[in-house]
Each structure stands twice: as structure tokens, then as C-alpha cells.
Image (spheres, rainbow, N blue to C red):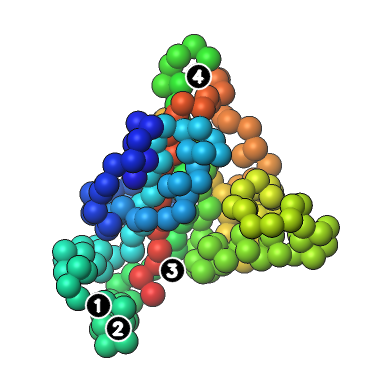
Amino acid sequence: MWRDGRWVERPGWGDAVRLEFPPPVGRRRVHNCDVPDLQLFPAHFGVHTVRFHAGLELDALNYLLTACRPLASWVRFDRPSYRALFLRASLMLFPFGSTNGSLAVWLHGRDHDGQPIERRRAIVTDYDGPATPSSAAIVLTRKILREGPARIGAYPCLGFFTLEEILAHLRPLGVWCAHGDENGWRSGRSDGSDLLEPHGGGQHQGNGDHEYGNRQRSR
């Protein structure tokens, strides 16, 4: 984890917290997750802290994964037999879950007057959850085929398309964007036209921190 400008080692799928996502997702339990964003965002945006959380909708599955975490050093959970076990557990609990999910970003910083400020953005779905993580690759591939590559070589794909380009791909799939601030989520379904500028008074500065939450449905 990147915290206060330095690397801090934290356990994977540990440090469980509950984050408030836009309706209909609501308050969900999430955990530490190791992703490339933890390295890319401090260099790209100059932020002091980056955290990434992930979780499943049903707490029973979250608790199961949490219980398996200390055993991961001795047990190979990537074996087919264990994958089948987790799949059976998920299918048994499937009727108790829903089909909604969300990917959200919380940005914390200070405005030009030095006052704390928070901005939130979230992509929310009632049903087609897998459309969200696959959308970036689809949009970028189509853009490269249409316009050609922006650069040549191997590099992180940051800043190559806009929020509106993602939403144009996701809207027909029943996925929409919500926004909010330090007072909570301020809107539900949105066409994204009001999301490109921060809502409210000040602009955020580069000394803030990013927090990401990824809520998956229980399938």
C-alpha cells in the first residue's frame, strides 16, 4: 500500500472496512487488494496515498476468503480442486445475493483555501457487472483501430480515453455513473454530462489520496 508517500506492507484481503457505494449497492465490506494502480497512480498523479479495496456482495464469502488468507502461504488455493470448492460455495449462496455491483473512486485532498475536500465517482450496474472491468480494454482497442496508437512501445495505458467514452460504451448495457462529495453520494443514474468537473467549490490538489472500491456480485 502507498501511504503518506511511502510503501507500507499490509496483508492481502485484510484490513476489512465498509464503504458506502451508490444505490442500489449500498454499504459493503471490502478488503486490501494488490493491483497495478498502487504503483501507477503515485507516479502519474503525485498522490500521497493510494488504497485499493475489493469485496464480494455476501459477507459469508468475504469471511471465507478472509479465513483462507493466513493459509495461503502453505496451501495452493489455485489448484483446480480448491477452485471447484469456491465455485460450489458461491453457487450455493447465489440465491441470497443480487445482480448489482459498483466500481468507485474516492479522492481526498484540500482546496485552494486549505480546507479538506472529497470527490467521488462510481460506475454502477443493476445486472451486467462483468461489463465494467472489460470496458476499458474494449474502448481502447476500438480507439486504436479507429485512430491508430497514441504511442509506440510498452507503457501503462493511462489517460488514453475519457469518462464519456467509457460511458458511451456502458450505457446500452444498463451501466451508469454516479457522483458525490464529502456529504455523500449526490446522484443516482446519470448520463455523465455533469461528471467531468468537480461538484462544489474548490479544485483538488495533487497532495490528496485515492481510494478505490470494487464491489462484485456474488456469482
Label 1 sits on what residue type?
Arg
Q: Which residue lies at the image location 30% right of the left edge and 72% below the top edge?
A: 96
Label 3 sits on what residue type?
Thr
Residue highlighted by disc 1: 76
Any part of residue 184 in sight: no
Ranked by sequence position, the earlier of labels 3 and 1 is 1
Secondary structure category for the residue under label 2: loop
Is 19 above or below relative to 101?
A: above
Which disc is residue 111 wearing?
4
Q: Are marks 2 and 4 in contact (CB under 8 Å)?
A: no
Q: Quadrant of residue 63?
A: bottom left
Nearer the viewer's eye, disc 4 or disc 3?
4
Residue highlighted by disc 3: 99
Q: CA distance from mark 1 to mark 2?
A: 6 Å
Q: Which residue lies at the image location 57% right of the left edge and 66% below the top edge?
A: 134
Q: Position of residue 172 (x, y in %)?
A: 67, 64
Image quadrant for the C terminus? Answer: bottom left
Residue highlighted by disc 2: 79
